[in-house]
Image (tube, rainbow, N blue to C red):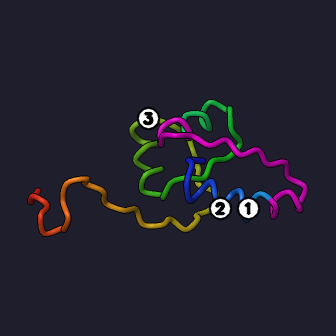
């Protein structure tokens, strides 16, 4: 997964639940959104969790990958950070 909300979800809820069912869980945290899907496609991972379905569908198409979603997880909204603007009214159109 990627570091942040998804990694926290795996660490704090998912890992213990799966291990109680007999699965071995090793969390590998990535710092980008490209490598997790490539690692999965190359067989380096058994499963990944970090993205919403539209991102997965676009990534599969653009990279000609045969990946299949198994389940969906909640995806938290992301923030907007400009470093310079103090209001969305200050954002340029387009």
Please tell me which residue lies in front, 68 or 59.
59
- Horizontal and vertical percent position of residue 73: 58, 65
Contact (Cβ within 8 Å) of mark 2 with mark 1 = yes
Who's the residue at 9% across and 58% down the image?
A: 92
Please tell me which residue lies in front, 1 or 57.
1
The tag on residue 86 is: none
**Mark 2 residue element:** helix
Q: CA distance from mark 2 to mark 3?
A: 27 Å
Who's the residue at 68% across and 32% down the image?
A: 44
Relative horizontal placement of residue 11, taking residue 83 as reference (left or right):
right
Please tell me which residue lies in front, 3 or 94.
3
The tag on residue 63 is: 3
Q: Residues within 10 Å of mark 3 (few under 14, many from 20)?
A: few
Q: Is residue 27 magenta?
A: yes
Mark 2 — residue?
Answer: 9
Q: Earlier in the sequence, mark 2 or mark 3?
A: 2
Q: Quadrant of residue 94?
A: bottom left
Give the residue furthest to the left. Answer: 93
- Horizontal and vertical percent position of residue 42: 62, 30
Who's the residue at 40% across and 47% down the image?
A: 58
Mark 1 — residue?
Answer: 14
Q: CA distance from mark 2 to mark 1?
A: 6 Å
- Horizontal and vertical percent position of residue 65: 51, 37
**Mark 1 residue element:** helix
Contact (Cβ within 8 Å) of mark 2 with mark 3 = no
Q: CA distance from mark 3 to mark 1?
A: 29 Å
| Region of the chain picked out in magenta, as a range | 16-36
Relative horizontal placement of residue 1, taking residue 62 as reference (left or right):
right
């Amino acid at each position: 997964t990627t570091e942040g909300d998804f990694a926290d979800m795996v660490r704090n809820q998912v890992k213990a639940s799966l291990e109680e069912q007999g699965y071995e869980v090793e969390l590998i945290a990535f710092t980008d959104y490209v490598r997790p899907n490539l690692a999965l496609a190359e067989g380096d991972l058994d499963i990944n969790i970090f993205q919403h379905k539209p991102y997965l569908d676009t990534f599969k198409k653009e990279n000609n990958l045969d990946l299949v979603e198994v389940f969906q997880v909640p995806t938290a909204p992301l923030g907007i950070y400009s470093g310079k603007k103090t209001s969305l009214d200050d954002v340029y159109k387009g």
